[in-house]
Image (tube, rainbow, N blue to C red):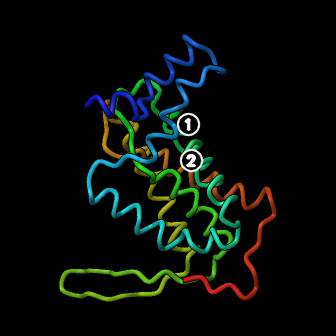
């Protein structure tokens, strides 16, 4: 509990500290970074790392190590701010890297739209692996985040997943690609 109190992003605390101390004090911003490196369980961590493994290496190859690291951190910060904007009165601590990873996914969708994502589909007793174009897979993922965020926002006190952090990070990642005119190399071998 003490760890979460000090290092997790709590939207209502962030808003009140900004109101009290002003925009130039660093203390309110620290959880925007620290919360990205905390996870609620091994499954939470493993899920985030799976998505980072699938999409991150190609985006890192395109940006380079240093720019990718800065992009990742900026994506997480923007995602945290999107979460605060969507739920400024929330007292639920927010942790996890999914907002930053969503930024990577947004960049991937525009950099490698024709790459295919191999996806396990389970329907009753039918189990198949299908290949889905990245633009379709990630586009549907984004739409799901927006729908879930809108539904969760209609239920006061709803906690558990920072849907708007995911959506905000994704939009940030796609915007960086568009604003800076980034393109994937012609010979890119994205998976």
Count numbered badges in the picture.
2
Q: Is residue 106 left or right of residue 31?
A: right
Viewer-proximal residue among 85 and 4? 4
Instruction: Using the image, tell me which numbered label, if any, was put on residue 168.
Output: 2
Viewer-proximal residue among 90 and 4? 4
Instruction: Using the image, tell me which numbered label, if any, was put on residue 81.
Output: 1
> Quarter of the image containing the N terminus?
top left
The residue sitting at the left extreme is 125
SS for tag 1?
helix
Q: Disc 1 versus disc 2: distance between alpha carbons?
A: 8 Å
Q: Is residue 51 left or right of residue 77?
A: left
Viewer-proximal residue among 24 and 165? 24
Figure check: 170 above or below 12: below
**Residue shown at the point (28%, 28%) measured from the top left:** 2
The spot of residue 40 in percent (x, y) is 29, 48
**Residue shown at the point (53%, 68%) measured from the top left:** 138
Figure check: 157 above or below 119: above
Q: Please tell me in which quadrant of the rendered image residue 56 appears.
A: bottom right
Do the residues under discs 1 and 2 have CB atoms within 8 angstroms?
yes
Q: Please tell me in which quadrant of the rendered image residue 126 appears.
A: bottom left
* Label 2, residues with CA under 10 Å away: few <14, some 14-19, many ≥20: many
**Residue shown at the point (50%, 50%) measured from the top left:** 99
The spot of residue 39 in percent (x, y) is 34, 49
SS for tag 2?
helix
Figure check: 184 above or below 181: below
The residue sitting at the top extreme is 20
Q: Earlier in the sequence, mark 1 or mark 2?
A: 1
The spot of residue 181 in percent (x, y) is 81, 64
């Amino acid at each position: 509990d003490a760890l979460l109190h000090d290092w997790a992003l709590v939207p209502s605390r962030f808003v009140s500290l900004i109101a009290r101390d002003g925009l130039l004090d660093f203390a309110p911003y620290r959880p925007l970074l620290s919360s990205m490196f905390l996870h609620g369980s091994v499954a939470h961590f493993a899920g985030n790392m799976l998505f980072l493994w699938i999409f991150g290496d190609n985006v890192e190859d395109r940006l380079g190590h240093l720019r990718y690291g800065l992009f990742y951190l900026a994506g997480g910060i923007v995602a945290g701010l999107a979460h605060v904007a969507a739920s400024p009165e929330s007292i639920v601590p927010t942790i996890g890297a999914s907002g930053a990873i969503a930024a990577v996914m947004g960049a991937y969708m525009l950099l490698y739209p024709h790459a295919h994502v191999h996806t396990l589909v389970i329907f009753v007793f039918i189990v198949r692996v299908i290949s889905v174009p990245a633009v379709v897979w990630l586009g549907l993922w984004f739409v799901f985040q927006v729908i879930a965020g809108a539904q969760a926002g209609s239920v006061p006190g709803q906690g558990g997943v920072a849907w708007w952090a995911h959506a905000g990070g994704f939009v940030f990642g796609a915007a960086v690609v568009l604003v800076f005119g980034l393109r994937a190399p012609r010979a890119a071998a994205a998976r």
